[in-house]
Amino acid sequence: MPALVLLGAQWGDEGKGKATDLLGGSVDYVVRYQGGNNAGHTVVVDGEKYALHLLPSGILSPGCTPVIGNGVVIDPKVLLEELSVLAERGVDTSRLLISGNAHLITGYHQTLDKVSERFLGKRKIGTTGRGIGPAYVDKINRQGIRVQDLFDESILRQKIEAALDQKNQVLAKLYNRRAIDPGQVVEELLGYAERIRDYVCDTTLVLNRAVDEGKVVVLEGGQGTLLDVDHGTYPFVTSSNPTAGGACTGSGIGPTKISRVIGILKAYTTRVGAGPFPTELFDEDGEALRRIGGEFGVTTGRNRRCGWFDAVIARYATRINGLTDFFLTKLDVLTGWERVPVCVAYEIDGRRVEELPYSQSDFHHAKPIYEYLPGWSEDITKARAFEELPQNAQAYVRALEELSGAPVSAIGVGPGREETIQINSFL
């Protein structure tokens, strides 16, 4: 069985963790291929809620090997804390594998993230302040610190000193901040080395052998398509590639070994942080979606901005990722509305536009054009087959399917692992 990709088809927070967890015992490896601890998954298992930030959701499935791929940036302190919390709750974390080529987030990355965001003022991006962007900057600038560097003190020290030569100048002269002592950074990082050594390996070799042996490998993205640094709503994006192409570079698995690309879609739309959001609601409906859907960031705790379903960005996600299927989540949240608006196109300067505009200026001025679908009032959380949904709920799903350009193969009707309707198998 070749590999398959699970990724967000909106601005993140679509419920990717539940989608991965749904595959459960059928999956041999779950790989996180990009992002850092700025992205979180919430997974509910037997009524227990687990908030995951760096770890792939496969860590909750017995027999599944979770992998942090080379495309991820890792805060070692956060990683070890997350492992400790899961272990205390009885979760076996011993199977975790970490790429030696993954880059590390250091304290100076976090400092730069926070001071630069404050410096931007009204122009701020809305980052989480966790150092993810600066870590990726160093990676591309070839000043990054990799996991494997923890095991060679001489190399680690040389790299830290070289990185801070320039950064301390910026901190002192631009931001009026105290210079950072390279020795303290080295000492802190070396303190993590032995605690993670046993997890580290050549994950690209492990994963390619697994695929060749017929194992099931799921590549799990953080954030979502519209936050991709190349294909998202730039500059209000993350610093990596959550799209399907990023799954290859962030894991070391070639594109010919990927058989399906599954997009996770929320039945409405949310966004965290700054940036354009055509269907955003500022009224009672927006508050209701936030309250009923529990729309608060897993990692940040920030309120998510809420709006109606946007078929324009769903079509864009289908095109950019080559999506083969959708997993539609949180359909239950829409129960109770007499009619449900769906954005089918935008109005930009008096023109009807049905595809995502390439111009940032146009997207900022886009106004949603809605079609209104009849709602439903019946409780759908007990439905386990598509035919058990109310007729209007079925019609809503079929309309989203047609508007988005790919079939819906699963539907989330509640937060629990079992509260899912599977129409077509993902495997």
Image (cartoon, rainbow, N blue to C red):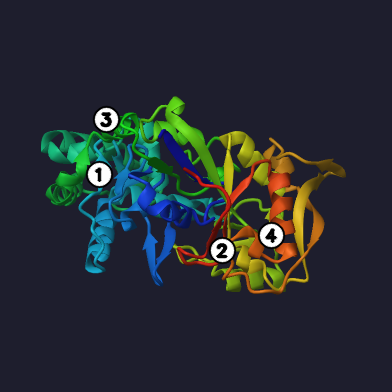
Amino acid found under the numbered disc labelled 4: Glu
Q: Is residue 110 above or below residue 69?
A: below
Q: Nearer the viewer, mark 1 or mark 2?
A: 2
Q: Which mark is residue 280?
A: 4
Q: Nearer the viewer, residue 276 or 414?
A: 414
Measure the alpha-carbon separation of dots 1 and 3. Answer: 12 Å
Pick whichever of labels 3 and 4 is earlier in the sequence.
3
Q: Nearer the viewer, residue 297 or 47?
A: 47
Q: Is residue 344 left or right of residue 161?
A: right
Question: Residue at coordinates 77% horizontally, 49% vertically from top-left?
Answer: 344
Q: Nearer the viewer, mark 2 or mark 4?
A: 2
Q: Nearer the viewer, residue 383 or 286?
A: 383
Measure the alpha-carbon separation of dots 1 and 2. Answer: 35 Å
Label 1 secondary element: strand
Question: Residue at coordinates 66% horizontally, 45% vertically from top-left?
Answer: 313
Measure the alpha-carbon separation of dots 2 and 4. Answer: 31 Å
10 Å crowding of disc 1: few (<14), some (14-19), many (20+):
many
Residue 34 on image: x %, y %: 41, 42
Mark 1 near mark 3, Cβ–Cβ under 8 Å? no
